[in-house]
Image (cartoon, rainbow, N blue to C red):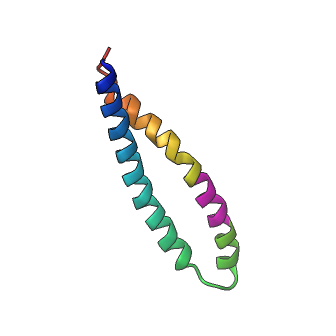
Amino acid sequence: MTRNECWVYRRRAWAFALCLWVVGAVLIGYVHMSLPGRGWGVWMSYLMYFLEFWYLLGLGEMHRWFYSWFTRDSV
């Protein structure tokens, strides 16, 4: 794989990871906003903050998955 191909795959992996991350973030935000403000909804809200933080950190891992998927056949 040439250096140019490496950059193409890297950019494509970031694009796929970012698109998937944005879709997931919108869904997580929608679920978080639709939780009730009392009772179990308050505790679920705290759990959602924790999950949103780890989901943000997972963006780099998604890039790594897509990059390894795109370059699986190249030597």
Residue 38: x percent and y percent? 68, 85
Residue at the outermost top position: 75
Residue 49: x percent and y percent? 64, 65
Name the residue rendered at 40%, 60% in the picture.
23
Name the residue rendered at 35%, 46% in the picture.
16
Name the residue rendered at 39%, 37% in the picture.
66
Residue 49: say if magenta: yes
Among the 4 quarters of the image, the one containing residue 72: top left
> 40 or 18: nearer the eye?
18
Name the residue rendered at 54%, 78% in the picture.
33
Image quarter of the C terminus:
top left
**In the rendered picture of this protein, how many numbered marks are placed on residues?**
0
> 70 or 15: nearer the eye?
15
Whether residue 53 sits left or right of residue 33 in the image: it is: right
Q: Which residues are magenta?
A: 47-55
Residue 36: say if magenta: no
